[in-house]
Image (tube, rainbow, N blue to C red):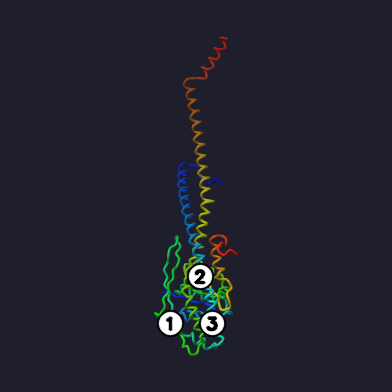
């Protein structure tokens, strides 16, 4: 794997070493980000689950009331009752930053100052079940909004966690090992060429000394003399 | 100022009209494109929170999924008058699976 395309030069080595330091730092930061996001996410998602259960139960109860009301009223009169809603809800959205994820926060305002002032019909021609059901729905509405908030936050955070996890893994298992291998490859190459130039110098020195002092001839002469003596 | 909308069949959503939410009626027999178009139109029209009945959402799962990744709007499933299909909780579960890799919150 040691990079087929790396050029074994000192400059490249310095560059790669710097890159490795950055990659390690980035890896650590991203890992921290992932862990913190995960912690926040788990808190949020538990709340999400709880809210959802409450909201679903609340809506079901309200729906039961609506069904009861429908049974004692004609379609027509129900339709008329809800034709011109009195109340109006408008939302205000602000964003909160959780570990670089912008999660929404909703708050709502009603048009009439009294939030309970929502019955758009006279009580004479409608069933009391209808009033109860509307009241129930209205009670659950703040929770519904909170549910929207947490659920959206969870969705956004889940996507961010997935992205961060991929980045962490890519750094940890691909980029950092690759850089390390490249650095090792260049270091070995450089060591090798250093050794080879050292040897070359030693050889050249030997040859030059030989040229200057004729060591080998003198050696032979001495050997011959030694032979003659014996 | 942003608004909140409710989409679904009339029986499931008319109560929300009393609360002051804008209700948009899409009956059960309608074409999926109709719901998808409406959802798109609402998302471009300052509707920040869109509640949609599980039954209606089931006809346009891809559209719903598309809005998961967007900053806004928040598309939230609610049970309709014909009962709770568990689809809403399923969506939460999906988030957990996406983030953690396996489901550790619901545990079943």
Task: Report the residue that reaches farthest toward the right.
Answer: B108
- Indicate which disc, 1 or 3, sits on the residue closer to the N terminus: 3
Find numbered disc 3 in the image and state the secondary structure of the residue it sits on.
helix
Mark 1: few/some/many CA within 10 Å (<14, 14-19, 20+): some
Answer yes or no: are tags 1 and 3 on the same subunit: yes
Check the residue under mark 2 and report the chain it is in. Answer: A
Task: Report the residue that reaches farthest toward the bottom.
Answer: A124
Alpha-carbon span between mark 2 and mark 1:
25 Å
Between residue A20 and residue A94, name the one nearer to us. A94
Task: Report the residue that reaches farthest toward the left.
Answer: A113
- Indicate which disc, 2 or 1, sits on the residue closer to the N terminus: 2
On-image quarter of the C terminus of chain A: top right
Q: Residue at x 56, y 46 (%)?
A: A1
Q: Is residue B107 above or below residue A207?
A: below
Location of residue A68 (image quadrant) = bottom right
Q: Which residue is mark 2?
A: A51
Q: Which residue is mark 3?
A: A66
Check the residue under mark 1 and report the chain it is in. Answer: A
Alpha-carbon span between mark 1 and mark 3:
19 Å
Q: Which residue is mark 1?
A: A117
Between residue A126 and residue A14, name the one nearer to us. A126
Find numbered disc 1 in the image and state the secondary structure of the residue it sits on.
loop
Answer yes or no: are tags 2 and 3 on the same subunit: yes
Query: Which numbered disc covers residue A193?
Result: none
Between residue B4 and residue A108, name the one nearer to us. A108
Check the residue under mark 3 and report the chain it is in. Answer: A
In this picture, residue A208 sits left or right of residue B59: left
């Amino acid at each position: 794997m040691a990079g087929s395309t790396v050029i074994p030069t000192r400059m490249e080595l310095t560059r790669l070493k710097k890159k490795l330091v950055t990659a390690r730092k980035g890896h650590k930061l991203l890992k921290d980000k992932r862990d913190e996001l995960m912690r926040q996410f788990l808190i949020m998602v538990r709340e999400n689950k709880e809210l959802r259960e409450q909201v679903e139960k609340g809506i079901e109860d309200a729906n039961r009331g609506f069904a009861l009301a429908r049974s004692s009223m004609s379609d027509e009169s129900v339709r008329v009752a809800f034709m011109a809603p009195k109340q109006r809800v408008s939302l205000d959205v602000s964003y909160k930053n959780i570990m670089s994820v912008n999660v929404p926060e909703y708050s709502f305002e009603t048009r009439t100052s009294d939030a309970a002032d929502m019955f758009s019909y006279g009580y004479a021609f409608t069933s009391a079940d209808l009033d109860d059901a509307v009241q129930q729905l209205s009670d659950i509405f703040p929770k519904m909004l909170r549910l929207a908030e947490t659920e959206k936050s969870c969705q956004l955070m889940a996507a961010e966690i997935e992205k961060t996890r991929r980045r962490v893994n890519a750094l940890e298992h691909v980029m950092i090992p690759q850089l390390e291998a490249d650095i090792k490859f260049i270091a070995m190459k450089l060591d090798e060429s250093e050794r080879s130039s050292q040897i070359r110098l030693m050889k050249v020195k030997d040859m030059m000394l030989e040229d200057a002092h004729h060591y080998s001839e003198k050696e032979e002469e001495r050997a011959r003399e030694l032979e003659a003596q014996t | 100022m942003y608004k909140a909308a409710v989409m679904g069949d009339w029986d499931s959503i008319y109560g929300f009209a009393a609360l002051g939410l804008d209700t948009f009626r899409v009956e059960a027999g309608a074409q999926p494109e109709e719901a998808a178009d409406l959802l798109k139109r609402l998302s471009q029209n300052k509707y920040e929170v869109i509640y949609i009945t599980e039954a209606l959402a089931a006809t346009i799962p891809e559209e719903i999924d598309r809005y998961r990744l967007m900053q806004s709007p928040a598309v939230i499933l609610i049970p309709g008058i014909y009962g709770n299909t568990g689809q809403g909780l399923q969506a939460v579960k999906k988030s957990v699976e996406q983030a953690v890799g396996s489901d550790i919150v619901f545990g079943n």
